[in-house]
Amino acid sequence: MIKHILTLVWNKKRSNVLMLLEIFVAFLILFAVFTFAIHYLRIYQSPLGFNTTESMLVYLTMEEDMDSVAQLEMREQLRREIETFPEVEGASFTSGIAPFSGSMWSWSNDDNGFHVWTCIYPTDENFAEVAELNLVEGRWFDQNDLNGKYPAAVVNKMFVDEYFPDRPIVDSVMQIGGERKIVGVVDHFKYRDEFEAELALTFLQTPLHDSDLRSMQIRLRPGTPAEFEQELNTTIARVTKRRDFVINSLETQRVRQSRSTWIPLIAGLSICGFLILNIALGLFGVLFYNINKRRAEIGLRRALGASQSEITSQFTLEVFLVAFIAMLLAAILAVQFPLLGVLEIPSENFYWSILATFGLISVVVFACAFMPSRQAAGIHPAAALHEE
Amino acid sequence: MLLNYLKLALKVLGRNKFFTAISLFGISFTLLILMLITAFYDAEFGKNAPLTEKDRMVFLGSLKLELANPDTVWTIDSTLMDGQMAYDSTFTIGEDVSSTSISQFSYDFLNKHLGDMETSANQTFFSGGHDYDIFLDNRKISIDALYADEEYWNLFDFEFVAGDPFTGGHVRDASPVAVITTDLAERYFGSSEEAMGQEIELGSRVHKVIGLVEKARTTAPLVAAEAFLPLTTIEARMLEDTDFHGNMAGVFMASEKADIPLIKEEVSSKVSAVVYPTPEDYNRVSTIPMDSAEMFAGMILDQNDPAKALSIIRLVFGILLLFFVLLPTLNLINMNLSRIMEREAEIGVRKAFGAHSGTILYQFVFENIIITFIGGVIGMLLAMLVLYLINDSQVLPQLTLRFNGTVFLYSLIICLLFGIISGLLPAWKVSRLQIADVLKSNQL
């Protein structure tokens, strides 16, 4: 059967070559878009690890010539005054490396005897509560850790999986920009972008006199009205004696940051949708015309006893075979991407993408070929033979 | 003659409505998307005010400070020779960069080392990205302010709706004046007419509005601010700080485009000649000056080398665009082939009465161009609608997409090319038909 159809396809190779080319190109475009879509959506699925709702992020500015005692006093006063508001559940200082800020600080070395690469996130003892982090092992650092022999740090699960798998990490002392005692492990912390894969990360406990702590994350009680921001604004202005600080809602920042990926993703997918529709309509039109031109052949076959479904499956299979050859050629080209590893995308995403593209085009081609075939096979043999 | 072709084309279109609808759908949506891409490209990267002269500009990126030490790497190969282990060691002297710091320039650095350029005609130093939150009648207004010197206005040709830019006098005296966008004026004062001469509170200072400009339509941070203030009204420490890093950017203007490589060269060599005051912290100072295309490429792609980012973007977008146009074209060719074959009989008769192959070729290409133009008009109307919807819905709040002359011209060219390419192959094929064959096998 297949061999017979192959002969039929080969006999009409000149009219089939355009369709072959069309499906080849369509496969490559869909493959490219699907790969990125699958890559980003899979990352998007992994949890952020912290709560962005009812949270405010304040980028502070401080006089640079303050000594550490003055800085400590100002931060303590600021935190105390903000936490006395009934609308506030908690406040924590972080550095300029804040969620969705675009900033990143990484540290790598082989001081531990093996290579360690980790993002650094300086913050204070309130952060776990304010950001609602989920600790899977150990505890978050507290006030007492500041007086300990080693400064405390908390790492994420990614860090453990990458550098310390299958061993207890809590209470071990590691070299991370100086000796640090790991006191706990959080499950996830994907702070830069919902669409950016989580990296190994270390929270460093940072004392309040450190001038790095330039921003503040504040958790509000649910249902706090938007006007509260103004009260917050006046308080911060009074304590820091400056006006050029910025208050952002963390949720808004998250939406804005994600939008820069959502927009091209949705645009790409809708363009693909349009292309598919365009191809489907064109294919349908062409096949409709071509199959109807073969009425004589159909009439003859029907007269010789072929059933309707035999004819339908022959025509559908003919078209599908051309499409299959085109997809196979395109897939051979597409599979080079994961094999050669030119892009920094996990290779399973490429394979999923090839599979998805293959499935989608097959469905479209099948639908476009089946309907005209079915219709043409329905004609009465006598009528078809009479016409010729 | 052309009128006849036109009549014929319209007649043919009406005859097979299903095919016509599919063709028009394909053509109009392809052109719609191409027009949207051109509109977006034009808004973001086009030569629009205030960046009309961007092709003559050199942009300063970031200042890179590095501590580089020579690093010797030993490689020891062991082999088994005559049953004995033999060792062969080689070493290479490489470089180990143990500390890197990348940030924008300080005013002091720019002034001291790049203030006196020989190859550039004009230059401006400015500091953008200063955000201020203001509460007015329980409304929060966020303002993105930019501090600049007076030359800023000579390089970037903002469209002034009212008033004037601040002058050298204002900058020298640190006068608290401001040029704001009409958009901000509407948010802050309620209407842009009332804004002139009023006072606006930014940070700890109150500035008097002396000029109103249209908001830049691009997202490039060097012009996309809402309030422009004299550089000297910035906090004093930002001007006095002798650290190399700060938050200043700089743009140099060449007197002609050919000078751009010279300016880049001068900037690079002047910066790398600078010695960091404490060489044990950093012993190498460098920067990569960029032309406008490289700067925009750097905005999209986070690459250390803007020239590389530009070539990657060109390659990726080129391939994607090519494939994207190729697909509907193939589809259209495929459909046109089927359609034209339906009219074999007509062609046979025309040829029998003495029409040349060339004439028939022209006729069919012309017909195809007509269809493409009808599709183009539909696409253009759709594009205007979609652009309106995009602007209205504020999906891209910093960008204003416009359907302007450039986009229109590009669309026309795209239409014409699309029509010719998709019509040529079927027309060529049909014009070569043998008269006798056609007349024999077809009924009229």
Image: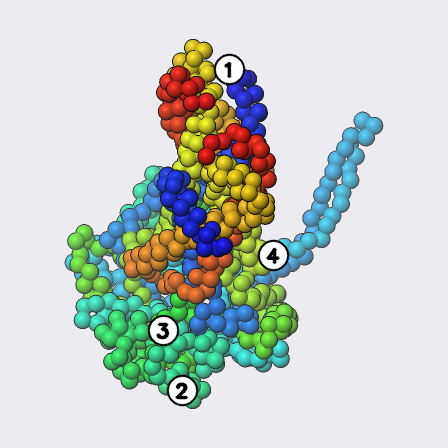
First in sequence: mark 4 vs mark 3 = 4
| Residue A243 x %, y % | 30, 72
Q: Chain of mark 2?
A: B
| Residue A360 x %, y % | 41, 32
First in sequence: mark 3 vs mark 2 = 2
Q: Residues within 10 Å of mark 3 (few under 14, many from 20)?
A: some
Task: Using the numbered discs, state the Cα–Cα distance from disc 2 to disc 1 in whole angstroms.
Answer: 88 Å
Residue at which label 2 appears: B170
Task: Using the numbered discs, state the Cα–Cα distance from disc 1 to disc 3 in whole angstroms.
Answer: 70 Å
Residue situated in front as seen by the camera: B268 or B76: B268
Labels 4 and 3 in the same subunit: yes
Residue A12 position (above or below residue B2): above
Q: Chain of mark 1?
A: A
The amino acid type found where label 4 is placed reads: Val
Residue situated in front as seen by the camera: B287 or A329: A329
Residue at which label 3 appears: B214
Q: Are marks 3 and 2 in contact (CB under 8 Å)?
A: no
SS at mark 4 in the image = strand
Q: Are marks 1 and 4 in contact (CB under 8 Å)?
A: no
Residue at which label 1 appears: A1
Labels 4 and 2 in the same subunit: yes
Q: Residues within 10 Å of mark 4 (few under 14, many from 20)?
A: some
Residue at which label 4 appears: B97
Residue B277 position (above or below residue B176): above
Asked which quadrant contains residue B163, the reply is bottom left
User: Depth-wise, is mark 4 or mark 2 nearer the camera?
Assistant: 2
